[in-house]
């Protein structure tokens, strides 16, 4: 496993951890993880499989942020 693979695996675990999703907000926000993924893409040494994994994580972060935004808009007491 390459260093890049290890980094992708670490970010995957962090993004998919139940504590991160259930807490409503992470100690490290989605933007932090997105920046780390973009840095991996900028390395220029990404295989097709790694690119697919990074892309999937970026889409997962996008989905999570949209869901969080919608929850905030529809939360009780916010009229």
Image (tube, helix red, strand yellow):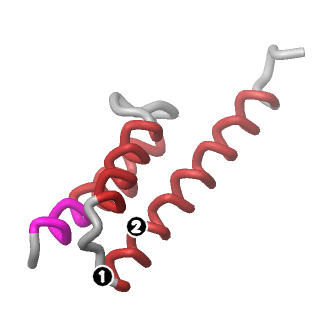
Q: Nearer the viewer, residue 11 or 55?
A: 55
Would you say 6 lies left or right of 19 here? left
Circle 1 residue: 47
- Which residue, as the protein is rendered here, is positioned at the far right? 79
Q: Earlier in the sequence, mark 1 or mark 2?
A: 1
Circle 1 sits in a helix, a strand or a loop, which is it? loop
Residue placed most toward the observer, 79 or 56: 56
Dot 1 crowding, Cα within 10 Å, few <14, some 14–19, many 20+: few
Q: Nearer the viewer, residue 74 or 33?
A: 33
Q: Position of residue 17 (x, y in %)?
A: 35, 53
CA gap between label 1 and label 2 equals: 10 Å
Query: Which residue is labeled 2 in the image?
Result: 54
Q: Which residue is located at x 39 percent, y 75 percent?
A: 51
* Residue at (47, 31) in percent of width and height: 25
Residue shown at the point (20%, 60%) measured from the top left:
7
Compared with 41, 36 (above or below) is above
Q: Residues within 10 Å of mark 2 (few under 14, many from 20)?
A: many
Residue at 40% x, 67% y is 54
Checking the image for residue 67, the label placed there is: none
Residue 71 position, x and y percent, is: 72, 36
Instruction: Report whether 20 appears left or right of 65.
Output: left
Instruction: Please identify the residue farthest to the bottom as the structure is shown.
Output: 48
Residue range highlighted in magenta: 3-9
**Quadrant in which the C terminus is drawn:** top right
Q: Determine the main secondary structure of the stretch shown in magenta.
A: helix
Secondary structure beneath label 2 = helix
Residues at marks 1 and 2 touching, judged by CB atoms closer than 8 Å:
no
């Amino acid at each position: 496993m390459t260093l890049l693979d290890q980094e992708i695996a670490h970010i995957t675990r962090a993004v998919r951890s139940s504590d991160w999703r259930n807490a409503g907000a992470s100690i490290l926000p989605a933007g932090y993880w997105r920046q780390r993924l973009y840095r991996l893409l900028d390395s220029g040494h990404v295989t097709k499989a790694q690119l697919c994994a990074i892309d999937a994580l970026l889409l997962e972060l996008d989905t999570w942020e949209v869901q969080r935004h919608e929850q905030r808009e529809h939360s009780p007491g916010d009229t």
